[in-house]
Image (spheres, rainbow, N blue to C red):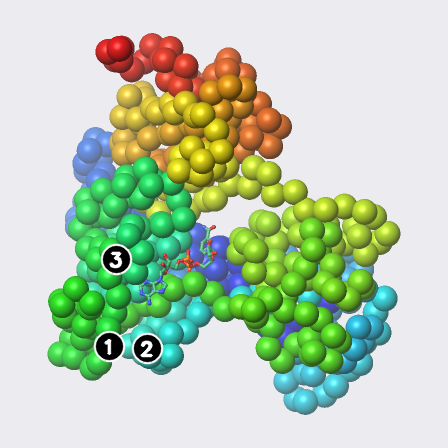
């Protein structure tokens, strides 16, 4: 195993885990501010210490990174610290930070070099005024105002987190809606929550120019507005780490966008060279990368397996959370005659007990077969409860089967059962629909 940086990659060092640690701090701060509504009187005004929050984040990350090192030792994985480059289809050159070189020979090679924040050349990232989340994770002080370019997954997660930490947030998204890859209903609900959080979203808008301004930077938008903010956060997608990898030397083919061409067994065009995760360019998620990894290893060891992404959930750590699995309503309508069931969280006892009544569960079924084809959730614990629906889709269950399950009570997951009942017009916990 060759790694140039700390073990754990983007997910553990600069992505999923550190951002979730900070989001947990931000949510905790928000909850403290709402303590009175839970019957708690705090002694004084609630405040937070950003450096203490980032120190907590660093400790969590550090422990997990060390954990990987220990797992490597326990499983007998040899770890080479340095930059790896293919010499040919069976050899990798590892160059360490002092320029020392080690040549490794391997029967099979797996490329798992991932991705990095994409840069827009017109708005060069300087880590000072124009930042990526890599910089945001390390800043000593949060800005008082920020403009986030891109209202995709990263943009929305950071928008809610920074807003909970009292940063004034504005967002620009070039497509029509926030989280444009999600179901349109999810975008509508999350845009309502952005509004409630006083986060200003300019959708279907581009940034024309960014230049130094009175407050730090001044951004001119395609809608004619100019906004002044302390900093700009770029969240416009990710670029593949395929340069300087020796792909040409080994004869490995790439796609037009620079990602590595692979087939469903994770092999590149060179039979013994595999590629997994973001660098394949198909789906940029840590958990599908893990799935890719198991497929590549099985095949490298003589197996004959192919990737199977049926029922991969999307989990987005906004506040409230967003999660989905399967087809959006627009995609499902193109393929099937569909039925839709919905259940709002405000109709749920547990949601009231937790003071988290925003959001809803929406299920989409194939009317003919009754198979569940899509589930879309906005609300508290959405990223946890989605897995019930993901299991149903992966195992081709019907909506009736999902609805017949006996859920515990009171739990947020009950909303899935209720939405399944609503899809069959038999939800007793919603007012009767007029025919
Ligand atoms: P993204 O593709 O989700 O969002 C980027 C957004 O920026 C898009 O909506 C796009 O329309 C917009 N955009 C692009 N150029 C723009 C411009 N010039 N002006 C305005 N808007 C512009 O990418 P991301 O948010 O950077 O995330 C990268 C990847 O990481 C994604 O695949 C995402 O799924 C993954 N990720 C997942 C999680 C999670 O699972 N919770 C968290 C973070 C990131």
Q: Is residue 314 left or right of residue 210?
A: right
The image quadrant in which ligand 1 is located = bottom left
Q: Which residue is labeled 3 in the image? A: 204
User: Is residue 92 visible in the rendered structure shown here?
Assistant: no
SS at circle 1: strand
| Foreground of the two, 79 or 107 | 107
Question: Residue 429, located in which quarter of the rendered image?
Answer: top left
Q: CA distance from mark 3 to mark 2?
A: 19 Å
Q: Is residue 48 left or right of residue 413?
A: left
SS at circle 3: loop
Category of crowding for the residue at label 3, using alpha-carbon neighbours closer than 10 angstroms: few (below 14), some (14–19), many (at least 20): some
Marked residue nearer the N-terminal end (3 or 1)? 3
Marked residue nearer the N-terminal end (2 or 1)? 2
Q: Position of residue 316 (x, y in %)?
A: 41, 47
Q: Position of residue 147 (x, y in %)?
A: 25, 65
Q: CA distance from mark 3 to mark 1?
A: 18 Å
Q: Is residue 211 left or right of residue 130?
A: left
Contact between labelled residues 1 and 2, with CB atoms less than 8 Å apart: yes
Q: Position of residue 54 (x, y in %)?
A: 39, 62
- Label 2 within 8 A of ligand 1 by Cβ: no
Residue at 75% of width from left, 86% of height from top? 101
Q: What label does residue 123 carry, if any?
A: 2
Q: Which residue is labeled 1 in the image? A: 210
Residue at 74% of width from left, 64% of height from top? 269
Marked residue nearer the N-terminal end (3 or 2)? 2
- Label 1 within 8 A of ligand 1 by Cβ: no
Contact between labelled residues 2 and 3, with CB atoms less than 8 Å apart: no
Work out whether 227 lies above or below 181.
below
Category of crowding for the residue at label 1, using alpha-carbon neighbours closer than 10 angstroms: few (below 14), some (14–19), many (at least 20): many
């Amino acid at each position: 195993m060759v790694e140039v940086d700390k073990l754990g990659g983007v997910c553990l060092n600069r992505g999923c885990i550190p951002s979730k640690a900070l989001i947990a701090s931000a949510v905790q701060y928000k909850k403290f501010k709402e303590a009175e509504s839970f019957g708690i009187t705090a002694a004084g005004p609630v405040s937070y210490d950003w450096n203490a929050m980032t120190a907590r984040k660093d400790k969590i990350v550090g422990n997990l990174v060390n954990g990987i090192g220990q797992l490597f030792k326990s499983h007998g994985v040899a770890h080479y610290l340095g930059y790896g480059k293919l010499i040919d289809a069976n050899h990798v050159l590892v160059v360490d930070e002092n320029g020392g070189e080690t040549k490794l020979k391997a029967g099979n090679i797996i490329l798992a070099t991932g991705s990095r924040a994409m840069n827009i050349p017109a708005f060069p990232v300087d880590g000072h005024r124009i930042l990526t989340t890599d910089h945001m994770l390390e800043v000593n002080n949060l800005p008082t105002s920020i403009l986030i370019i891109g209202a995709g997954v990263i943009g929305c997660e950071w928008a809610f987190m920074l807003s909970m930490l009292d940063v004034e947030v504005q967002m620009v998204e070039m497509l029509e809606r926030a989280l444009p890859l999600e179901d349109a209903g999810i975008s509508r609900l999350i845009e309502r929550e952005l509004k409630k959080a006083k986060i200003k979203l300019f959708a279907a808008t581009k940034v024309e120019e960014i230049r130094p301004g009175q407050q730090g930077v001044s951004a001119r938008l395609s809608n004619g507005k100019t906004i002044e903010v302390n900093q700009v956060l770029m969240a416009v997608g990710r670029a593949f780490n395929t340069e300087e990898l020796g792909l040409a030397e080994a004869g490995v083919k790439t796609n037009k966008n620079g990602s590595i061409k692979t087939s469903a067994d994770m092999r590149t065009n060179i039979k013994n060279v595999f590629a997994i995760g973001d660098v394949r360019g198909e789906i940029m998620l840590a958990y599908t990368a893990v799935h890719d990894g198991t497929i590549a290893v099985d095949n490298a060891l003589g197996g004959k397996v192919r990737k199977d992404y049926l029922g991969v959930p999307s989990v987005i750590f906004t506040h409230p959370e967003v999660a989905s699995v399967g087809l959006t309503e627009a995609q499902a309508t193109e393929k099937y005659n569909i039925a839709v069931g919905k259940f709002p969280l405000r109709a749920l006892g547990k949601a009231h007990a937790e003071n988290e009544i925003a959001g809803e569960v929406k299920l989409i079924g194939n009317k003919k077969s009754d198979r569940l084809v899509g589930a879309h959730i906005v609300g508290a614990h959405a990223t946890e409860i989605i897995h019930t629906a993901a299991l149903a889709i992966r195992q081709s269950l019907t909506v009736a089967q999902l609805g017949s399950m006996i859920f515990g009570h009171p739990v947020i997951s009950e909303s899935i059962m209720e939405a399944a009942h609503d899809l069959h017009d038999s939800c007793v916990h919603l007012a009767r629909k007029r025919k």
